[in-house]
Image (cartoon, grey):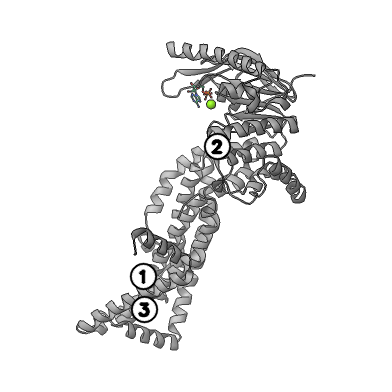
Amino acid sequence: MPAKLVVEGLTHHYPDEYTGESVHALEKINLEVDEGELVTVVGPSGCGKSTLLNILAGLLPYREGIASVDGVQISGPGSDRGVVFQEHAILPWRSVAKNIGHGLEIKGMAKEEREARVKDFVDLVGLSGFEDKYPHELSGGMKQRCAVARTLCADPVIMLMDEPFAAVDAQTRITLQEELNRIAIATKKTIMFITHAVDEAAFLGDRCFVFSARPGRLKAIVNINIPRERRIWADMNADEEFVSSRDEILRLVREEVSVAVEE
Amino acid sequence: MLSRSNLNRLAAFWRHFPAANAVNLTLIIIGIMLVWLLISNTIENPARYLPSPIQVVLSSFDMIYKGLLPSYFGDTITRLVVGSSIGLALGIPFGLLLGLNRTVADMFYPMMNFFQSVSGIAIFPIVVVWWGNSDKTVLAVILYTSFFPIAFTVLSGVREVPLRYIHAARTLGASRYQIIRDVLLPGSMPHIATGSRLSIGFAWRAVIAGEMLAGREGLGWMIFTGQDADKTSEVILGMVMIGVSWIILDHYLLRPFEADTIERWGLVQR
Ligand SMILES: Nc1ncnc2c1ncn2[C@@H]1O[C@H](COP(=O)(O)OP(=O)(O)O)[C@@H](O)[C@H]1O
Ligand SMILES: [Mg+2]
């Protein structure tokens, strides 16, 4: 079966209008993501992870290379690619239910059908009872649950997540990671999850793409062969596969961080 | 003991009762009335310089009896409502449309800034040249006065809607129209609220000044002619009517609107 997401030779420079120089953010990225796979992308800060995600989301135009979903070249935002942003990007003027149903509303789905679907996703992310609350009445973790549900509810082909749990406290982050794993099992979604946290990358990924320091290159791919059902934080430190994958990713990332520091 | 925190708690408790607010307000009004009464009783010729509240109330009875006060009040309110509704109805979409495109917005920004600073009173003479001392003149000035502040505020507001909200809607597949409806319009609601307040406030001033200058009957005219006729109590009555109507308008129209939108959404804290 052909891959869901294909990226070939993707290179990106940000022009700088003031100095005339440009920032070389991505260099010849080649990668594929298969259907139902959850891949994590990890790399030092500033290595171009968000740049890659914004290009795939269609929010950032690119000139060099190819990026396509289901064989269709990416040329702008579209509901086939759902995005969960790092900062809270759910709309403050919509209730939880209205935020989650927004994608369906945009597609023009009838109200009854929409509300039934929204309810499923409210339940899936554990926000039952909060449907009529507004974002400012939610905790950070609940806001991100709402953002995840909003993206899932629009039923994208692939879900792109840019460090979605980076801004919540450590305890909540662990819960959210386990919940995302459960959601991945339940929905079988194709997901690209960006993070700078190595244990998060190892815990969530079927595969982990490790990026080099800027300009971002795909430095290595680490396979993490742990069945999703077994991925529970309480068991992870005793799991040899998890520990070895995590240490491998950590080693690869450390090399890059030290390179970045020496430069 | 009434410690500071106890006092705060009492105040918070008190604030939850509209009735308590009404009591507070009544106490304040009675206080002002007493001071006012005291002053007008100590000065010479109070009928000319500062008639007592009782005289003002009496003259209001007189004017209501003659049917003048309701008619002036009705005229002024009609002008205000018609003028500022049209001003807002045109100004909000205009500001929104200009704000959509960065280049267009930058182009129009100085012009909008210019007109929102030239007050309605300043354009009055030229409008009189065009249309004479007519209702049309007064309305045009009100419309002008309410249009530019709201259009300018909304224009700035649209540009301040965080990009991440627009991105979120775009990645859900929103069309340009859907982005305007679901993101930019609600996102500039704090500015629309502030701008409306500004606009209606300015329109209030413009209607009063317009009536004075153009000699059209209404509350502004009443204040103006009251001074000519040496009826100071009518001047004060006009002032009080203006202030009270503004408070009522604010309390029953603007505040509930804000409470249902920007406060409910947590965009402003009170
Ligand atoms: N809009 C932009 N204009 C210019 N340079 C940018 C822009 N966005 C990001 N960059 C630069 O590109 C590099 C990669 O950024 P980013 O993709 O955000 O990295 P990451 O998400 O991995 O931390 C950084 O050096 C950053 O400073
Ligand atoms: Mg980033």
- Dot 3 crowding, Cα within 10 Å, few <14, some 14–19, many 20+: many
User: Which residue does the image show at 53% across and 34% down from the upper left?
Assistant: A169
**Do dots 3 and 2 share one subunit?**
yes
**Do dots 1 and 3 share one subunit?**
yes
Q: Nearer the viewer, residue A169 or A193?
A: A169
For label 1, the SS is helix
Measuring from the top left, give residue A201's x and y in whole percent: 61, 22
Quadrant in the rendering for residue B214: bottom left
- Amino acid type assigned to the residue bearing label 1 in the image: Leu
- Amino acid type assigned to the residue bearing label 2 in the image: Arg
Protein chain holding label 3: B
User: Which residue does the image show at 34% across and 81% down from the upper left?
Assistant: B234
**Considering only order in the chain, which callout, 2 or 3, is on the residue closer to the N terminus?**
2
- Dot 1 crowding, Cα within 10 Å, few <14, some 14–19, many 20+: some
Q: Which residue is mark 3?
A: B237
**Which label belongs to residue B164?**
2
> Can residue A61 be seen in this snapshot?
no
B25 sits to left or right of A132: left
User: Which residue does the image show at 74% across and 30% down from the upper left?
Assistant: A185
Mark 3 CB lies closer than 8 A to ligand 1: no
**Image quadrant in which the N terminus of chain A is located:** top right
Q: Which residue is mark 1?
A: B213
